[in-house]
Image: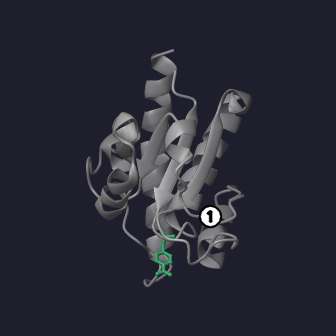
């Protein structure tokens, strides 16, 4: 079973920290957190060292979800280390595929391929929008995360 998951967006301060925090929350609920390794990163490095965006953390907190991420950029070793590299949108996926070694290309997937309410679509970037964008991101990453986890557990 793929157990090492990396969630990736552009800045690693909004969408991928939310996906990471929600997925960790789901693992904790299921009592299987120790079986997985979960991290997030950005295709860009401008926000390296920062906590998740305050608005994203506040929206998550309202749902009882903690976002532990400290932003970092994707690095070459990630393509070796992780079993699944989950892009939040198609730009992120293209960037990842442009730097992935051939043997790791199959690991790079669009996270919303697991979302039955928008398969193959982008997780919309909430950075420049209003508060509702952060709740929408949480709804999407929760649906996608639940479906991904169910698939991983069924395959083991
Ligand atoms: P994220 O959102 O990719 O979901 O973390 C963004 C955060 C910051 C920027 C872009 C997207 N930025 O350009 O600074």
Q: Is any atom of residue 3 visible in this view?
A: yes
Residue 97 x/y as whole percent? 33, 51
Q: Which residue is mark 1?
A: 72
Q: Does residue 38 appear to the left or right of 131 in the view shown?
A: right
- Residue 156 position, x and y percent, is 51, 14
98 w.r.t. 103: above or below:
below
- The outermost residue toward the top is 156
Check mark 1 vs ligand 1: CB closer than 8 Å? yes or no: no
Considering only vertical position in the picture, is 3 above or below 109?
Answer: above
Residue 18 visible in the picture: no
Secondary element type, mark 1: loop
- Residue at position x 70%, y 37% in the image: 28
Residue toward you, 37 or 20: 37
Identify the residue at image location x=37%, y=61%.
92
Residue at image x 45%, y 17%? 155
Tell me if mark 1 has few (under 14), some (14-19) or many (20+) residues whose alpha carbon lies within 10 angstroms of its own.
many
Q: Nearer the viewer, residue 95 or 154?
A: 95
Viewer-side residue, 127 vs 93: 93
Total count of labels? 1
Residue 14's x, y, as percent? 54, 69
Query: Horizontal and vertical percent for residue 31?
Result: 71, 28
Could you tell me which residue is drawn at 36 percent across and 44 percent down? 109
What colour scheme governs how the chains and residues are painted in the rendered image of this protein? one colour
Q: Is residue 142 above or below residue 92?
A: above
Q: Quadrant of residue 27?
A: top right
Task: Answer with the quarter of the image where residue 36 lies.
Answer: top right
């Amino acid at each position: 079973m793929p157990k090492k998951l990396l969630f990736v967006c552009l800045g690693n301060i909004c969408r991928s920290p939310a996906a990471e925090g929600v997925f960790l929350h789901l693992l904790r609920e299921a009592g299987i957190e120790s079986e997985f390794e979960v991290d997030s990163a950005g295709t860009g490095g401008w926000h390296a060292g920062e906590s998740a965006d305050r608005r994203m953390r506040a929206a998550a907190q309202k749902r009882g979800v903690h976002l532990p991420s400290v932003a970092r950029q994707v690095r070459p070793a990630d393509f070796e280390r992780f079993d699944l590299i989950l892009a939040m949108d198609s730009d992120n996926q293209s960037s990842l595929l442009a730097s992935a070694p051939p043997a790791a290309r199959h690991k790079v997937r669009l996270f919303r391929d697991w979302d039955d309410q928008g398969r193959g679509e982008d997780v919309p970037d909430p950075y420049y929008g209003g508060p509702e964008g952060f709740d929408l991101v949480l709804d999407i990453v929760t649906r996608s995360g639940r479906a991904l986890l169910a698939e991983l557990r069924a395959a083991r």
